[in-house]
Image (cartoon, rainbow, N blue to C red):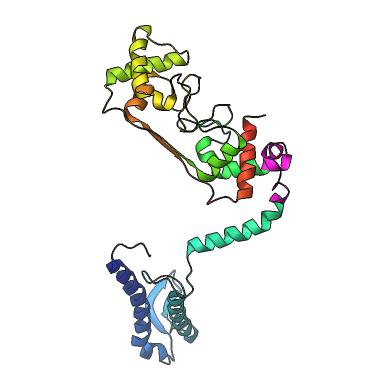
């Protein structure tokens, strides 16, 4: 409710909410004479079904009228205590987000003893602990499997965490940093500086670096383009730079694919990958166990 860009909508919601309650009260007030009347004989509407099933017009019970009024009072009290009138936040200051945080804090307090024995344990030792592995796997399935897959082998655009190829480094400290703070890897598009034919030649050279089939007549031209535009990140030997998250182009690991068309697309249009930081979702103790599980996948 607090995200309205115009105060009109805040007033609109408030009028609808209060107007509905006022209408209910008015309806009872306008019909008070009929509601209070003493009916000596129940009226017959004249509708009969199956020969003996008659519809009657019974007066409204007094308890129903009282309940109706009490519900209107309850609705007014609710709108005073809780958000419901546009930008009005309620006297209790309740928000669903705050409730979730409180529940998370309560949960973390209850499970804290479980993580206590892993607090000072080195991550490689945690990775060898059966209980820690079970916890780490559940944390992975709940927070990471959506991108990296339930088997941690990734998919197009999402790294495989079970091999020895790491964009930013595979040490326990580097993995923990990645999970905690996230990563944002950007390869700029070169379409303004590189023509498609030149990008195709660079792709042939890049394919040659990892031993893939390539056109040897175009490799030299591609190397010149590579030396001009690519060495700053991927290095003269094409082995990448973990400080920048620039991938190694000499192995057989490809994040988006190794075909010429895919490499040309990458060169011309660039890539923009972001892994969200998990420090807002997981406690430091949970991140340590998750780190140990991920590290263990490539260090069995």
Q: Is residue 111 above or below residue 297?
A: below
Q: Is residue 145 above or below residue 101?
A: above
Q: Quadrant of residue 9?
A: bottom left
Look at the image and say whether residue 131 sits in the magenta stretch.
yes
Q: Is residue 144 shown to the viewer in this render?
A: no
Residue at x 30%, y 71% (from the top left corner)? 11
Residue found at the far top of this picture: 217
Q: Is residue 81 above or below residue 28?
A: above
Q: Is residue 77 above or below residue 107?
A: below
Look at the image and say whether residue 152 sits in the magenta stretch.
no
- Where's residue 135, x and y in %? 66, 44
Q: Quadrant of the C terminus?
A: top right
Q: Which residues are magenta?
A: 115-134
Q: Quadrant of the N terminus?
A: bottom left
Q: Quadrant of residue 133?
A: top right
Task: Characterize the magenta stretch by its predominant secondary structure.
Answer: helix
Residue at x 44%, y 23% (from the top left corner)? 235
């Amino acid at each position: 409710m607090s995200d309205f860009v115009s105060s009109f909508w805040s007033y609109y919601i408030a009028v609808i909410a209060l107007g509905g309650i006022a209408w209910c009260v008015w309806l009872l007030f306008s019909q008070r004479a009929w509601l209070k009347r003493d009916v000596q004989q129940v009226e017959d509407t004249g509708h009969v079904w199956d020969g003996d099933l008659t519809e009657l017009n019974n007066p409204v019970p007094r308890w129903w009228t009282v309940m109706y009024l009490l519900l209107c009072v309850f609705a007014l009290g609710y709108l005073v205590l809780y958000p419901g009138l546009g930008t009005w936040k309620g006297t209790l200051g309740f928000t669903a987000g705050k409730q979730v945080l409180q529940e998370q804090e309560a949960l973390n307090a209850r499970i804290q003893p479980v993580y206590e024995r892993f607090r000072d344990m080195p991550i490689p030792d945690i990775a060898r602990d059966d209980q820690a592995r079970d916890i780490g796997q559940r944390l992975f399935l709940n927070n990471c499997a959506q991108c990296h897959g339930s088997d941690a082998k990734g998919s197009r655009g999402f790294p495989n965490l079970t091999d020895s190829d790491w964009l930013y480094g595979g040490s326990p400290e580097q993995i923990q940093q990645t999970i905690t703070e996230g990563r944002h890897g950007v390869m700029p598009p070169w379409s303004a500086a590189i023509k498609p034919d030149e990008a195709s030649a660079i792709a042939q050279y890049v394919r040659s670096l990892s031993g893939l089939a390539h056109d040897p007549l175009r490799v030299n031209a591609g190397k010149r383009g590579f030396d001009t535009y690519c060495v700053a990140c991927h290095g003269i030997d094409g082995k990448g730079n973990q400080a920048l998250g620039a991938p190694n182009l000499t192995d057989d690991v490809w994040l988006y694919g190794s075909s010429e068309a895919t490499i040309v697309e990458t060169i011309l249009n660039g890539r923009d990958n972001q892994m969200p930081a998990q420090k807002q979702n997981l406690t430091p103790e949970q991140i340590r166990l998750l780190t140990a599980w991920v590290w263990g996948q490539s260090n069995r």
